[in-house]
Amino acid sequence: MVSGISLPWPWAYPALEVIHLIGVALLLGNLVLLELRVFGRGAALPVSELARLSLMLVAIGFSMAAVSGTFMFATQPGDLLANRAFTLKMLLLFVAGSNAAMFHARQSFEKMDLTARMLMLVSSVIWVAIIALGRWIAYV
C-alpha cells in the first residue's frame, strides 16, 4: 500500500474539497452554457465571443479541480488507486478530454451541426458521471 502525504493543517483537506467543487462548478456551468448555445439557445450571442469567455472559465475551473484533486490524491494514493469509482473517474476524465479535443479539432463552433450537438451532449453526460463518481469515491 502506498502511503500519502500528511496535510499540515486539519482544515487543509476540506479547503481542497471546496476549491475542487468550485472548479467543477466553473467547468460544468460554462460547458452547459456553451451546450445551450450549440443547441440554438441565445442565438443573439456571438458564439465566438461566448466561447472565448466560457472556455477561459472552463480552463480556470479545470485547473482548480486538477490542482486541488492532485493534492487530495497525494494524501491517500494507495486507497484511491484501489477504488473503482476513482479509477473510473480518471478514465472518464481522459474520455472527456478526448471528446473535447475532437469537438475543437473539427471546429464544431463554426459548424454547429448535429455532430457538434452530440459531442456537447456527450460531454455533459460524461461530466455529470465524473461528478457522481467523485462523490461515490467515499462510499466504495
Image (spheres, rainbow, N blue to C red):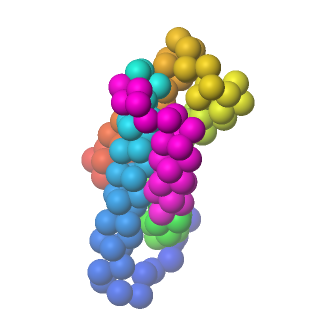
> In percent of the image, x 42 and y 81: which residue is there?
7
Comparing 96 with 3, the one in front is: 96
Q: Quadrant of residue 103?
A: top right
Residue lying at 49% horizontally and 19% vertically, measured from the top left? 117
Query: Is residue 62 at least partly visible in the picture?
Result: no
Name the spot of residue 6 as percent of width and height, x first.
Answer: 45, 80
Query: Can you see residue 38?
Result: yes
- Which quadrant, please, contains the C terminus? top left
Q: Residue at x 38, y 38 (%)?
A: 33
Is 16 left, or right, of 60 in this rendering? left
Q: How many marks?
A: 0
- Residue 96 position, x and y percent, is 55, 36
Residue at the image point whose x is 55% and y is 20% from the top: 112
Question: Is the stretch drawn in magenta largely helix, strand or loop?
Answer: helix
Left or right relative to 41: residue 110: right
Q: 92 and 32: which one is in front? A: 32
Q: Which residues are magenta?
A: 41-64
Q: Position of residue 23 (x, y in %)?
A: 41, 58
- Quarter of the image where one finds residue 108: top right
Q: Is residue 46 magenta?
A: yes
Q: Is residue 47 found inside the magenta-colored segment of the image?
A: yes
Whether residue 36 sits left or right of residue 2 in the image: it is: left
Q: Nearer the viewer, residue 121 or 53?
A: 53
The percent coordinates of residue 1 (x first, y second) are: 53, 62
Q: Does 66 appear above or below 89?
A: below
Tell me: residue 140, above or below residue 122. below
Where 34 falls versus 8 (above or below)?
above
